[in-house]
Amino acid sequence: MVASAPQLAEFESHPAPTQRPRGILALLAAPITWMVVFYLIPLLILLAHAFWSVDYLTIDRTFTLENIKTVFTNSLYPTVLIRTFLMATAVTLTSIVIAFPISWFLAKKADRNKELLLILVIFPLWSSYLVRAFAWKTILGTNGILNSVLQWSGLTHEPVSWFLYSKTGMFITFCHVWLPFMILPLYTILDRLPNALLEASDDLGGGSWATFRRVVLPLSLPGIVAGSLAVFSLTMGDYITPSLIGGSPGTELIGGIVADQFGVANNWPLGAALILPILVILMAFVLIANQFGALGRDEG
Amino acid sequence: MSDQTLNQRLSAMEPAEVAAEYRAGRLSRRDLGKFFAAIGLTSTLGPALGQTGAAAADDLTMIIWEGYSDEQYAAPFEAGNDAKIQATFAGTGDEMFAAMQGSGGSTYDMVSASSDLPQRLYDADLLMEIDPAKLTNYPNLYPQFQKPPYITFDDKLYGVNFAWGPTIMLYNPEVVTTAPTSWNAMLDEQYSGKIATWNYPLQIGQYALLLDPKPENPFILDDEQLAQVKDILIKQRPLVRKYWDLGGEVAELFMAGEIAIADGWPYITQQIVAEEGSVAEAFPAEGVTGWSDSWCISKNAANPELALKWADWMIGPEGQLGITEVMNYGITNKNVVESLPADRRAALGMTDVEADYAKIHMWQFIPNYDKWVQVWQEATAS
């Protein structure tokens, strides 16, 4: 069977309903006020701190670029920023590879148990993030489950210490705790992908690899980008996992450094200045994501 | 009616009956609260009784070091004063300061401030002056704890000193077979990957004890001395298994066999012993740092009278004995110390309180603290 034109059109675009600007404004007034008062203004005040300085307990509001200079010249911050960026990238790519087959199965193969399986995917989100991170401590520890199994099976003779309190442990934990945020957008987009397109590709002689590469992958790109945006930004800002599963030399991520500037050093200006490069990276990502249509389509 | 008989009576009744009793005024809300607590319920009946979830007037909120709200002394205080203690544990004094300053002192009635912290809280105008005449147990404190410099500003009292102790070295005697005598043991390569140290810039003071020449006061360091400590920390870096954040974590690290040597407090020893783990304490020859903790009351406390009562309770016999038993820490009430048997006093490091106290380099306000934070982060996080 060949995909009919209307089917394709429906998948490709979502025509906007006839708009009545005033009605929409009235509808959006409350959420917009909320976002401006409780999100935008506090964020701007916070960022303004980056250009101020701190003198013991008081904030000196004279404009200065000193903090920005510190962020780029003190070797600590670029090192940690690059480490965080690489970690977030690795976690995001791995999440895509793990989440894709799961989402594909959920969307295209699971028929009767679809709802149950979806609940199972979301289920971990019902427990606290802390609990899930802690669970990895018992699995990855020197006398943890993983080491016990490895030694029992004879694969190792001594406990492996680099599973826990290491970047490896953090990587595993991140990939696990953020996985649902990759699966859900991917599932949504794959579920909407008409089977007719797959059958058409098949009819035209495309093997499963060609179908995947030329039909499935391009059409699921918005889902991949949306999921990546979530996983990447969650990793970029996290400081719990570095503290619980990292905590050894060379594992600190930028989230922990920022938290310390606010909570330990009482240096809000430097903390705010450290947020700027993170924001720039995330903004760039959002702009790229927008190009791929991950944030909704705007063609009329 | 005693709590026990009340609870027995209530457990025998149907929920509807309990509700009826409550509406008829034969049961107070407090009675119900106790009952719920006893059966492990938090106000399941609340909605049925038309209760809102609002906090009771007698909530005492505090941000403290882990263990300072232990049941042993908190429960009798709560029962005696019809109060409810709501404690938040902080991992560092800085965290306490940030929490206090962030809310202008309105979130927490009290802080268990170590000797480095009150100066900052006072400078930020967050502390309430304390009238010692209102503390019945105050005259029994050793004179040195009545008006120590770290809680006295402008000749006025801003805290009630109730506990003190050293930051010592803890080790697993099954791995570290000869008792360490120097902080250098925490830089020893044979324990590589088995070392944990507290993730706190103030710990620079502890490692400053290793400097040659040793600074007279390890908390007053110039830039050159700070750079030397940084070198020590960088040397230690590759050997560290974990920079620990909360006291409970150290016990966990020892119990899980992750580490063999760490800095910590007698409280941690207590926790490990309670879980039948293997641990011993060492007092390095270079000396130790330590802390002297006081209850400070927030200037904007919702419940200053109750906070004062708690401070008084904690320097009274029940609170003080509780601190020695639960925390394994030194105390400040002369009468209580003198009531302890000699061996107990020796175990707590309080044979001669004045002399034993003077041996510890107590945490103090650090003028160039921003530099300390910078050095600590650069040495441990990069």
Image (cartoon, helix red, strand yellow):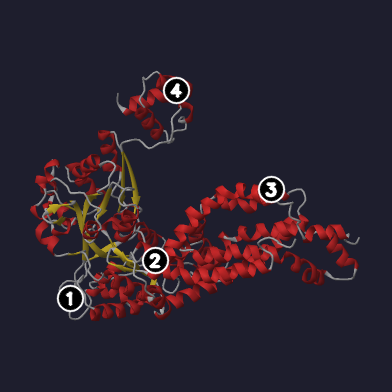
**A216 or A268, nearer to the observer:** A268
Q: The disc labelled 1 sits on which kind of residue? A: Pro
Up the image or down, A170 lies above or below B144; here it is below
Badge 4 and badge 1 both on one subunit = yes
Q: Position of residue B288 (x, y in %)?
A: 21, 67
Q: Label 3 to label 4, Cα distance in Å?
A: 40 Å
- Kindly identify which residue carries mark 1: B215
Badge 2 and badge 1 both on one subunit = no
**Mark 2 crowd level (few <14, some 14–19, many ≥20, 10 Å Cα):** many
Q: Secondary structure at mark 2?
A: helix
Q: Which mark is residue A116?
A: 3
Up the image or down, B262 lies above or below B7; here it is below
**Mark 3 crowd level (few <14, some 14–19, many ≥20, 10 Å Cα):** few
- Kindly identify which residue carries mark 4: B19
Q: The disc labelled 3 sits on which kind of residue? A: Leu
Q: Is residue B244 visible?
A: no
Q: Label 4 to label 1, Cα distance in Å?
A: 67 Å
Give yes or no for contact between labels 2 and 4 (Cβ–Cβ under 8 Å).
Answer: no
